[in-house]
Structures are given as structure tokens and as C-alpha cells.
Amino acid sequence: MSTQLNEFPPALPLKKILGPSFVILALGLGSGEVILWPYLVSNYGLGIAWGAIVGITFQFFINMEIERYALVKGESVFVGIAKIFSWAPYWFIFSTFIGFGLPGIIAASAEVFASVVGINEFQWVAAVMLIIIGLVLSLGKTVYDRMEAITRTIILIGVPFIFILALMLSSGANWGTLVTGIIGRGDGYWFLPAGISVATFLAAFAYSGAGGNLNLTQSIYVKEKGYGMGKFAQKISGLTRGGHQQSIQLSGSEFEINKNNISRFNDWWKIINREHALVFWLIGSLSMLLLMLLAFNTAFGASGNSQGINFVINEGRIIGERFMPIIGTLFLVVVSIMLFQTQLGVMDSTSRVMAENVAIRLLRSQPNGKVRLSRLYHGFVWAQITFGITLFAFNIYEPKTLIVLGAVLNAIAMFVHIGLVSWLNHKSLPLIFQPTTFRRIIIGVIFLFYGFFSGFVIIGLF
């Protein structure tokens, strides 16, 4: 790490730091919010709504501990963890690729879009979508700026449209059912209905937000936006704008621990908690609840809901019947676009994770050297695209199966990274910047929860 001391930068106002939480929120829109929780509701009712709220609340606290490290150190948690556990980069590369390389989200987007235009073999539509994503992430001056702009636009247009549909289709009785579902009461059951797949529930729980190693990209986005000591970090450039020649130093910056710098950290900590609570937790919670309510008002009880993502097609059909066909079609188009942008965000984030961890390993042999992070990033983008298209070529493309399998793997990855980040903050951060006892207890509970459910699912496979 650099020995040069910098002053801890002053905190920015809330309106100037909105961004990373939109990105991390969008990573979950196409998996938990649009697919898995509505799927469960369409088959089992609103009594499982509590799981979505608990899940996203867990992720709020997980994400903030990840951001804590990046604010103080000006480097990603991957860099910090690798200093303690030399094997960690290999784990992050493997678990990220295996967890998110499965192209379930883009397959879902393609199937919904194909249902609108009347195409049967939607896997090839998905293949084209993957190539478009590769081009989007390979062009432009700065990858993050483009990602943030696309994500924010889609959320601010698509989410309100679905909210309006949910509100227009909801009755007072259904709102009451949703409220009781938030406290765990369903139709004839409490918390979990008979016959529900524990693996599917865990998958939805893990994707109540982002999930898996994607949560860890919060520390990278802190660098990209220049929050806290991230101000002194560099950004990833686009492939066609010199990014292939760009060398980036991964290690963060040091600052003197004094009253002024501690005060500035506290200011940053308050503002990023507020931003994440407002954008990620509040908008994310409302998104999931209203999408579940919409699924309950339309597809609940419809035939074929348990098969793949037929419940989404059923939603579009019923919306069209209750309003006019064009509204149902528009709903399906919006869902397809939201799924597409989720895959775009996932591809960007996972490529960042894997590129940074390869770079960490390369720098071990050249401690004072630099790496071409942008080249590694774009290499992983196209590696994932190639992997996805290869699976499609071998007729492996059923969306829900791929999403659930990936989510279960990512739940296990979350159990691992929660423990690693907690230990990292304990060992690497000065005491004044470490989490309070209250937050330590919460993270401990979350760690045990994911450990128990992951073990339960693994044991059930054998």
C-alpha cells in the first residue's frame, strides 16, 4: 500500500452521491424482484412476503460493512481480504463465474420478449442479447458512468409503470393480505407453506437485492464514484477509449487518524447509510412488495405457474384482459427490458470482481507494479458471453432452473464473504472505524442464517 498520506475527503451532499445503490438495486430486479418472489407468490400466495423484507434488510447491513472498508481504505474488499487469505482470489473468481455465469436472467428476458413477438426458440434471442451486452460494456469512455446512466433510466421508468399497474389492480382485501404476509401469515400457514422448495426460497432470499459476490462490488463502486478515500482511486475505461492500455493501481491510500479525518469519515458514514437506505432498502422493498402484489392479483391460481416463468406470461395475459391487450404487451416488454438491464449489470459487476482478483494475484509477483485491469475486465465480459452461448447451443436454457441453481450457489458464496469481510474489518480497520456492537450482532445473526440454510440445502442434495 502507498505510504503517501492524504486527507480524508469531505463528505458530499446526498443528491451528489446517488448512484451505486441504484446499480446494486438493479442487479436484483431481474432475479429476486421480477422472477423469484413473484414466482413463489403466484404459486403459494403472499404469506411468504416476510422473506423478501428480511432478505433485503440483511443485505442492507451486509452492503454497509463492505462500503465501510472501501471508505476507509480506498480499495476494494478483495484487495484487503487477499492480504489476509492468499487463497481468496481463487475462491472469488471461481464462485463468481460459477454462480453468475449461468445465463438464467438473460434467458428469462429473451423468453418474455419472444412471447411478445412470437418466437419459439428464444435461446437464440438470448444469445443476441448477450452479444449486445458485450458491445455496450466494451464501448464508451468510462464503463461505470454508462452503467449508472442506463440503470437509473430503466429503474425510474420501468419500476413506476409496474407500480401503477399493481396499484390499479389491487383491492383493499389484497392489501390486507400483503400486510399479513409481511408478518409471515399466509392462507393456512405461517412463514413457509407446505410443499415449498427450500432451495427456491433460499434462492429468492439470496436475491432480495443483489446476492452472491455482487454485494462485494459495492466496494468497487465506492472507488469508482470517489467516495471517502476512494477519491484517490482510478476508474476502468472503455475498451475502445484507451482502456486496453490503462494501468491501474489497486492498493488504496493512507490518511492520518486525527479528529478532522475521523469527523469526515463519520459524515461520509451517515450520508452513505442514508443513501443506501433510501435507494436500495426502501425502493427495493417497495419494488418487491408491489411486484409480489401484482403477481398475486393476476397470476395466483393460474394454470402452469409452476413451470418455468410461465407466471410472467400469465401476468401479461391477465393484465391485457383487465385493461386492454396493449397494456399487457407493454408490461411484458418492460419486464423483458428490466431483465436485460439486470443481466447487463450482473455482467459488469461479475467481470469487475473476477478482473480485480486476477489482478491481485498478478501483483503478488510484482508488488510495486501495475496491471491492465481494463483488459482483464473485458476479457471476463466476453468469456461469460461465450459460456452462456455455449450452454444455449447445448440446449441448456430453461430460465427458472438456471436462476435458482445460480442463486443457491450465490447464497453459499454470501455465507463465505460475510465471514471474510467481518474478519477483514476486525483485523484491518482502526478501532474508531470498526462497526458498533449492534452491527456486529446483526452481521453475526446474518452469517449464521446463511450458514444454516446453505448447509440445509447442501445436505438435501445428498
Image (cartoon, rainbow, N blue to C red):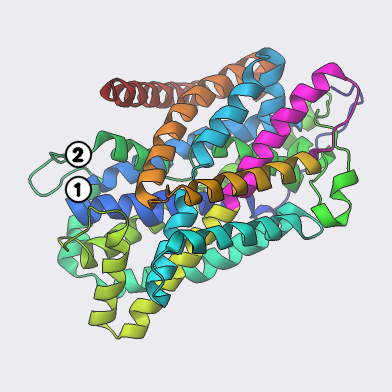
Look at the picture and state if 376 lies above or below 149: above
Question: Residue at left 19%, top 39%?
Answer: 191
Question: Residue at left 76%, top 59%?
Answer: 139
Amino acid under disc 1:
Gly
Q: Is residue 114 magenta?
A: no
Mark 2 burial class by Cα count in 10 Å: few <14, some 14-19, many 20+ = some
Magenta region's main secondary structure? helix
Residue at mark 1 to residue at mark 2: CA–CA distance: 6 Å
Q: Residue 381 vs residue 125: left or right?
A: right
Look at the picture and state if 179 lies above or below 428: below
Q: Which residue is mark 2?
A: 191
Q: Position of residue 317 (x, y in %)?
A: 27, 74
In the rendered image, the quadrant that contains the C terminus is top left
Q: Residue 68 vs residue 11: left or right?
A: left
Q: Is residue 372 magenta?
A: yes
Amino acid under disc 2:
Phe
Do residues under tags 1 and 2 come within 8 Å of each other at their CB atoms?
yes
Q: Quadrant of residue 57?
A: top left
Q: Quadrant of residue 202?
A: top left
Give the residues in magenta: 345-373
| Number of the label disc, if any, that sits on residue 47 | 1
| Number of the label disc, if any, that sits on residue 321 | none
Camera-side residue of 435 and 293: 293
N-term-proximal mark, 1 vs 2:
1
